[in-house]
Image (cartoon, rainbow, N blue to C red):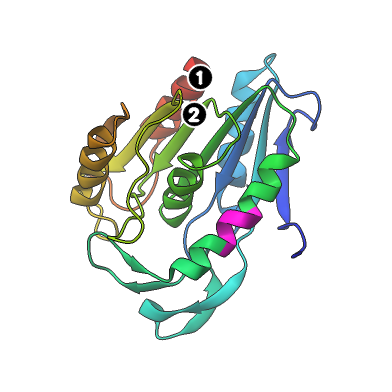
Amino acid sequence: MESLLPFLEFGAPRGEAELCVLLMHGLGADGHDFADVARILSDAAAPRKWRFVLPHAPEMPVTINMGMRMPAWYDIIDLAQPRAVDWETVKESETRIEALIAREPAAKLVLAGFSQGGAMSLHVGLRTERALAGILVMSGYLLESDAHPCPEKSTPVPLIGVFHGSDDPVVPLTAAERSMEVLVGAGYAPTLKVYRGMEHSLCDEEIRDVFGWLAQV
């Protein structure tokens, strides 16, 4: 068995948290990318006990980046919609994310992520046996193919929040809109908030909205 992914942690200690957010970064980044956001959200939540776990993705060659090795949750073959990906690498990351889920005892657990990390939060969140409180996707998309369709709703589904910039050149808004359409068709009830003028990034308004969404969870 592979070792547990390394991670950063903020907020309430494991075993004391009321809510745990497993927050996954985007391609080429690491957990430090969202450290400031995790601190802001955990501080704003006080005296509620929120915990944030920010794992670091393993390094692997990424086809769209000329095979360069970098932190990635899976290999992207091309930028088509839906993304063409190496599903073996998706499965490997799914297994390692499940291992992090299994060690968190908080009554409420949210899977969250940005871009590639958002895609993994949806992919794992729709398949895990753990009862989740929510799935949060920032500038992300649904991983799907003919051989890997979106699973149909079969059990009580947590809140699914999708947050996206209108001017994103990396993951266009049409990718988020397609994800919404597929999720609704499979029986889910996701919500979408679009930030006018925002590219592939975060803004202060989005961070405030994420806090409100987590408070609702």
Please indicate, yes or no, whether residue 35 appears anywhere in the rendered image: yes
Q: Is residue 75 above or below residue 163?
A: below
Please name the residue that numbered disc 2 is placed on. 134
Secondary structure category for the residue under label 1: loop
Tag 1: amino acid: Val
Residue, x 79% and y 32% (percent of image)? 14
Q: Is residue 173 above or below residue 211?
A: below
> Which of marks 1 and 2 precedes in the sequence?
2
Please indicate, yes or no, whether residue 28 appears anywhere in the rendered image: no
Q: Is residue 40 magenta?
A: no
Report the number of discs: 2
Tag 2: amino acid: Gly
Q: Is residue 108 above or below residue 27?
A: above
Give the alpha-carbon distance from disc 2 to disc 1, as whole Å: 7 Å
- Position of residue 159 in the picture relative to residue 104 (left or right): left
Please name the residue that numbered disc 1 is placed on. 217
Residue, x 45% and y 32% (percent of image)? 207
Say few, some or many: other residues with alpha carbon within 10 Å of mark 1 (under 14 / 14 to 19 / 20 or more): some
Secondary structure category for the residue under label 2: strand
Say few, some or many: other residues with alpha carbon within 10 Å of mark 2 (under 14 / 14 to 19 / 20 or more): many
Q: Could you say where residue 187 lies in the image, as x and y percent from the top left?
A: 29, 30
Residue, x 51% and y 23% (percent of image)? 214
Q: Could you say where residue 67 lies in the image, as x and y percent from the top left?
A: 45, 85
Q: Is residue 78 above or below residue 21?
A: below
Quarter of the figure with the N terminus: bottom right
The segment highlighted magenta reads 92-96
Q: Is residue 93 magenta?
A: yes
Name the chief secondary structure element in magenta: helix
Q: Nearer the viewer, residue 41 or 114?
A: 114
- Position of residue 214 in the picture relative to residue 59 (left or right): left
Any mark on residue 171, and which?
A: none
